[in-house]
Image (spheres, rainbow, N blue to C red):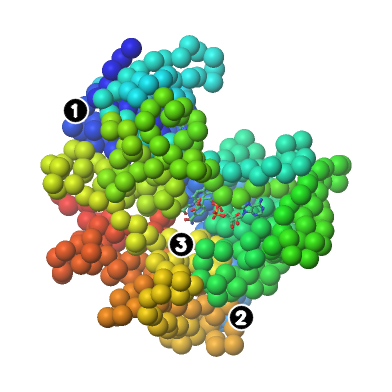
Amino acid sequence: MTRYDMVVIGSGAGLMVLEEALKQGLKCALVEKSKIGGTCLTKGCIPSKMLVYPADFIRDMERAGRIGIGVGKPELHWDTISKNMWEQIDFHEKIEKNLLSMSNLHVYKGAGRFTGPDSLAVWYEDGRPEDHISGEKFILAAGARSFVPDILGLEATGYLTSETFFGEKFPDKPWESLVIIGGGAISTEFAHIFSAFGTKVTILARASTILNKEEEEIAQFVTQQFVQSGVEILTDVDVTSVSKDKYGKYVTAVNRVTGERQTILCQEILIAAGVQSNGDTLDLEHTGVEVDRRGWISTNEYLETTQKNIWALGDLNGKYQFRHKANYEALILSHNLFKAGKEKRREAFYDVVPWTIFTHPQVAHVGMTEREAQKSGLAYKTAKNYYSEVVGGIAMGFRKQDGDNGFIKIIVGQNKKILGVHIVGPQAALLLQPFVYLMNEGYECPQMGTYEPISESMVIHPSLNELTAWVFEKFD
Ligand SMILES: Cc1cc2nc3c(=O)[nH]c(=O)nc-3n(C[C@H](O)[C@H](O)[C@H](O)COP(=O)(O)OP(=O)(O)OC[C@H]3O[C@@H](n4cnc5c(N)ncnc54)[C@H](O)[C@@H]3O)c2cc1C
Ligand SMILES: NC(=O)c1ccc[n+]([C@@H]2O[C@H](COP(=O)([O-])OP(=O)(O)OC[C@H]3O[C@@H](n4cnc5c(N)ncnc54)[C@H](O)[C@@H]3O)[C@@H](O)[C@H]2O)c1
């Protein structure tokens, strides 16, 4: 049995810790059962944004008349759009080649499961005999996978998840109609993409609104914009069954409040009902690693699990599922493992986690919603400003009475402390990011006037903010 100084399971943000370990000259193993690069690169943030941008462009063209530009009906070149997207996904091959050339690293392309607190079996899909390895330290970065609700007829009818969409079920052309089950981030990004590409989209959401983690006014605003663009939204519904015949797929949903039943005919069904931990694939019962009742691995502020030689980061610990959050944790862990003495260890904080839903209009979020501020009992005040109130927005064609006139809403506590910021409209991610830096100043970053609030903050991924924030990593 080969023994390693460090074994990393999962090649998303896990790669960042691995790279640091390799730089230190440690003998390392990487265990990855799928494409190297993880969800973000191969089936998440990056390929989805290669589709979002063309969809944004179509929506901008549609409103160009307001600023005095005439354009014809946009023509969709699906081959070009798909090619650009697959080029990004295929980057995993380059990363793998590079890793394979490293002398102090062995890459195991299989599924890892613990056989003891410091030993792992690697199982291969192609039937090769298992490998057995052991390690001094283990980094769990195995992420999460789509949660598929138990719906009558679903398996027999067939459906997509983000994993199969960015895989074997990628369509030859946009569907004529699509039902999306779920009303969160994936749902609203895919609804934007495919409605702009001409697909008739219906969203079936269990909650009383789509985007139910967002500021209520913003969820309503996006709902109105979607309806305006022809997206049908049914909220408060339970999907009870699906079936198919020669005309297509049928999705039946029952309103949880009124009991009304509705059946929708569509060409394809996308499940976007949240994610579940991949912790259950790791046979953690052979270790002392504790998981919570939903299977997320419990970690403390140092990303330590309850087993002293095992750390966990990213989606797997259930604390916000964003790539920039996983990166933040990977940097903290690398620092603590390789650069710090015990007393100088960095702690992970989750008070200032920003995100952007790249739907249309874009939605950006950091800190508390007003409802959360109310619940907290803190004294607070709010303020709103609309795109139509500033020349930049007016020049983009926004007027007070326009239905798509987006806004920023801030929630501020005592002593001018920023509690929450929510933006809906063009470039929301870019507009939000400075608030993230401010919210971190004097908290994560003790000295004022340095670039630390930028370099130490989470930077919304994948947004153009990375252009300005990552420059601090490029010193000669
Ligand atoms: C469609 C979509 C769009 C998204 N868009 C955004 C976005 O715009 N911005 C954003 O910040 N986040 C986005 N996310 C979320 C983001 O992708 C995740 O938060 C992030 O990738 C998590 O990184 P990770 O390193 O924790 O896990 P992952 O990147 O998921 O890596 C885990 C890896 O572990 C492997 N693995 C799992 N179990 C085992 C095992 N037993 N043995 C071996 N290997 C194993 C998996 O194959 C996987 O490659 C999106 C997600 C999806 C699905
Ligand atoms: N731009 C981004 O940062 C981005 C984009 C896409 C995905 N993501 C991440 O990926 C993860 C997965 O995205 P997601 O959209 O699947 O999850 P999500 O948690 O954002 O949304 C899931 C939604 O589905 C609803 N739901 C659950 N079960 C349902 C059912 N049976 N029927 C109808 N609705 C149901 C939930 O109420 C929830 O609103 C998220 O955690 C998110 O953080 C991020």
- Contact between marks 1 and 3 (CB within 8 A): the answer is no
Q: Residue at x 26, y 62 (%)?
A: 454
Q: Residue at x 29, y 49 (%)?
A: 301
Residue 213: percent from the left, percent from the top? 52, 63
Residue in front for this viewpoint, 305 or 57: 305
Answer whether residue 91 is visible to the viewer in this image.
Answer: no
Disc number for residue 403: 2
Residue 51: percent from the left, percent from the top? 55, 53
Disc number for residue 152: none
Give the quarter of the image for residue 104: top left
The residue where tag 1 is placed is 25
- CA gap between label 1 and label 2 equals 58 Å
The mark nearer the N terminus, 1 or 2, is 1
Residue 110: percent from the left, percent from the top? 46, 23
Q: Residue at x 33, y 38 (%)?
A: 305
Q: Is residue 187 left or right of residue 141?
A: right
Residue in front for this viewpoint, 370 or 79: 370
The mark nearer the N terminus, 1 or 3, is 1
Element at label 3: strand
Disc number for residue 356: 3
Please state, as top left, top right, bottom left or bottom right, where the N terminus lies in the image.
top left
Instruction: Determine if the C-beta at disc 3 is less than 8 A from ligand 2.
Output: yes
